[in-house]
Image (cartoon, rainbow, N blue to C red):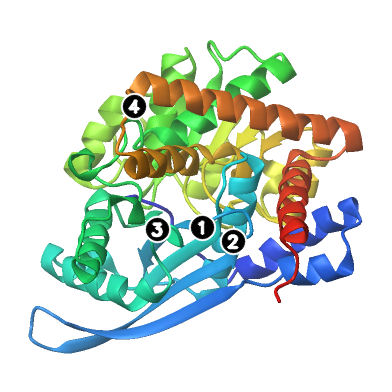
Amino acid sequence: MTTAAVIDHTERDPWEVALEQFDIAADKLHLDPNMRGILRECQRELIVHFPVRMADGAVKVFTGYRVQHNVSRGPGKGGIRYHPSVTLGEVKALAMWMTWKCAVVGIPYGGAKGGVVCDPKTMSNQQLETLTRRYATEIMVLIGPERDIPAPDINTNSQTMAWIMDTYSMHHGYTAPAVVTGKPLSIGGSEGRNEATARGAVYTIIEASKHLGLDLDGARVVVQGFGNAGLFSAKLMQELGASVIGVSDTGGGIVDPKGLDPAKVDAFKKEHGTVSGFMGADRITNSELLELDCDVLIPAAIENQIGEHNAPKIRARVVAEAANGPTSPEADRILFDKGIFLIPDILCNAGGVTVSYFEWVQDLQNLFWREATINARLKEVMVKSFSDVLEMSKKHKIDMRTAAYMVAVHRVAEATLTRGIYP
């Protein structure tokens, strides 16, 4: 399951942040007020309350969400997260971000997201399966291979997707692999899916380094969050010759100016449950880790990590957002003024949804591709998308996030306008 930092909802509501980011791009695009009104709202917001029998025999009622922001360009697409602090505002923001993410990389999906308010770390595997199957049944009014396709997110994984796929299939009387992505290979998953978010992020870092004239061989890299995206980002950056000098997870961080071996840190974490305490490295807090002097900083944890309070202390040359929403709009302005090149989340971490799209296509066709083919197609998508956003950034002399939003919002607005207002 993915490890991530705790969501701090004392910070700004993620939905407010998402709206502000949208409004900035809408202003730059001189977006029609009617279209702005449409795109500022989520199309569907489903809240479900459902009972699960716990190990001690007691029945506990859980709250879950599934939100579709805009499906003008295709079926809804977005992950499902299990976390004690999931809120409707957070899920709405993530759904909106998914709309822009799919649009910026040009794949035919709209944005969706789901979540259940729970602490999976206190639940048995059996309880998680029961919760997942009941939640899947509750949101079945929205999901389907042509309607809305869930995927793993924080504290969910390929097994969670297998349970959802099976539950959907049992209700419909036939096997429907394309109802979810991020599945195990044995039931229609795709090669290369596990590493896709990190691989896509690294492709954008390579393009950014070319643009900036930054040599990645020997570059100092810091990774916040050591779940799926963080671990593979660290490994892939090391393969490029970079030196990973700091990493962190919910238990804290570690730093070694001489460089860390991500594989050894991963082995330590599997044994001890955290990277903190790794032999030969100094302990460091998550906040201190973000402020380390480095060439590339990869926030791969969760929202609200870089804000007005710490953005002036960020010393990276490139910030590559492998996580969703780690940087506030105020921090964006500070980083831009400091000359720090930021690769925004809706571009940087779109490798995951891109390979999810490849998985969905393979499931619908019952025709599966080799991993080399998938990685080559992913690179093609990420390089082209980076180029589109960079071109918009140069044209309007704006930061990369605003540029990415302008590219994405324009595409979604065009699709919405072309389809027209029903009836």
Mark 2, Cα crowd under 10 Å, few <14 / some 14-19 / many 20+, is many
Three-letter code, disc 3: Pro
Of the residues shown, which amino acid type is indicated by label 1? Answer: Pro
Q: Position of residue 323 (x, y in %)?
A: 52, 47
Element at label 3: strand
Residue picked out by circle 2: 71
Query: Is the residue marked by circle 3 packed among few (<14), some (14-19), or many (20+) residues within 10 Å?
Result: many
Checking the image for residue 75, the label placed there is 1
Residue 131's image quarter?
bottom left
Q: Position of residue 17 (x, y in %)?
A: 68, 63
259 vs 158, left or right, is right
Q: Which is nearer the N-term, disc 1 or disc 4?
A: 1
Which tag, 3 or 4, sits closer to the chain's start? 3
Whole-angstrom CA distance, mark 3 to mark 4, is 21 Å
Q: Is there any visible trace of residue 81 in the rendered image?
A: yes
CA gap, disc 1 to disc 3?
A: 10 Å
Q: Are marks 1 and 2 in contact (CB under 8 Å)?
A: yes
- Which badge, 4 or 2, is on the more N-terminal residue? 2
CB of mark 1 within 8 Å of CB of mark 4? no
Q: Specify the label residue 150 is tagged with.
A: 3
Mark linked to residue 295? none
Report the quarter where the C terminus lies. bottom right
Q: Could you give the CA–CA distance between mark 4 and mark 2, rounded to whole angstroms? A: 27 Å
- The residue beneath circle 4 is 369
